[in-house]
Image (tube, rainbow, N blue to C red):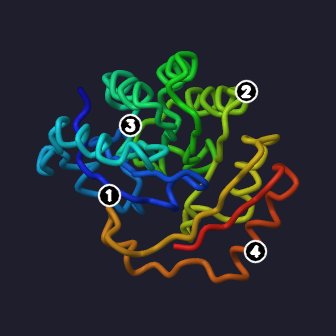
């Protein structure tokens, strides 16, 4: 079974429109410099896991009002047992939102086919040409593109999103991402927060100014039905 490394018992921002909690699973195959979950990504074994019995008791104690669970990380699909975990949630009639980096398209497609996911947020890290640089790992970009296609054709609620980090994304890069995800319903630009980053050097980097974010929004508006901005 998966190891739950964090539990936010009420998380209104993570699953909009659904009374939900968020669970954080350990480990990730990416090493994005701006990640705020450094210990979870780099040293998950150093974080105590929540006993599954405790988590199930938590769910049962809130069965009269809890509507859904956001499954985040780390990268939830990194763990092959994630399907068993999602099945437990669906058995309790909970809606499931999955946060993913899109690097496991086969596993994603299987879970969708089994009806274990209701909503997806995929973090698009960079234009394909800069994926290895931004994630600081060897990335099969065909898998990234595969996940984008699977999500767009899934019939589920979904959002593609990017964390806008100065130096890692610019207007031209954003246009490349727009073309990569073109036709998607929702694209979300998230403001970078220079706090507790995996690479401490980024804590000195200033986020984009409001007008610069507006410029990034304008650069991709034509590719999507809706472009949102989420402040840090």
Q: Position of residue 97 (x, y in %)?
A: 51, 41
Tell me the SS state at disc 3. helix
In the image, what residue occupies the spot 77% across and 54% down? 175
| Nearer-N-terminus badge (2/4) | 2
Give how far apart the Cα atoms at labels 3 and 2 are.
21 Å
Tell me the SS state at disc 2. loop
Q: Quadrant of residue 90 in the image?
A: top left
Q: Quadrant of the N terminus?
A: top left
Circle 4 residue: 214
Circle 1 residue: 37
* Figure check: 142 above or below 125: above
Mark nearer the viewer, 1 or 3: 3
Horizontal side of 37 relative to 141 (left or right) equals left
Sort mark 4 into few (<14), some (14-19) or many (20+) by Cα contacts within 10 Å: few
Farthest-out residue, front:
64
Sort mark 2 into few (<14), some (14-19) or many (20+) by Cα contacts within 10 Å: few
Mark nearer the viewer, 2 or 4: 2
Q: Are marks 1 and 3 in contact (CB under 8 Å)?
A: no
Circle 2 residue: 153
Give how far apart the Cα atoms at labels 1 and 4 are.
27 Å
Circle 3 residue: 76
| Nearer-N-terminus badge (1/3) | 1
Q: Position of residue 193 (x, y in %)?
A: 46, 73
In the image, what residue occupies the spot 33% across and 64% down? 199
In the image, what residue occupies the spot 47% across and 27% down? 104
| Nearer-N-terminus badge (3/2) | 3
């Amino acid at each position: 079974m998966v190891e739950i490394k964090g539990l936010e018992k009420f998380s209104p921002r993570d699953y909009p429109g659904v009374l939900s909690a968020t669970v954080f699973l350990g480990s990730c195959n990416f090493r994005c410099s701006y990640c705020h979950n450094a210990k979870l990504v780099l040293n998950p074994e150093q974080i105590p896991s929540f006993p599954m019995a405790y988590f199930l008791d938590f769910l049962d104690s809130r069965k009269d009002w809890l509507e859904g669970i956001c499954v985040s990380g780390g990268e939830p699909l990194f763990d092959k047992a994630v399907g068993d975990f999602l099945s437990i949630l669906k058995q309790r009639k909970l809606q499931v939102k999955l946060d993913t980096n899109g690097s496991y398209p086969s596993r994603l497609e299987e879970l969708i086919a089994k009806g274990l996911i209701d909503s997806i947020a995929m973090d698009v890290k960079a234009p394909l040409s800069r994926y290895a640089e931004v994630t600081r790992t060897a990335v099969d970009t065909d898998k990234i593109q595969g996940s984008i296609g699977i999500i767009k054709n899934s019939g589920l609620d979904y959002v593609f999103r990017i964390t806008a980090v100065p130096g890692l994304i610019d207007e031209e890069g954003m246009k490349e991402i727009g073309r990569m995800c073109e036709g998607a319903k929702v694209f979300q630009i998230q403001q970078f927060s220079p706090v507790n980053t995996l690479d401490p050097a980024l804590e000195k980097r200033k986020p984009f100014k409001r007008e610069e974010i507006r410029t990034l929004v304008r650069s991709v508006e034509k590719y999507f039905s809706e472009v949102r901005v989420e402040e840090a």
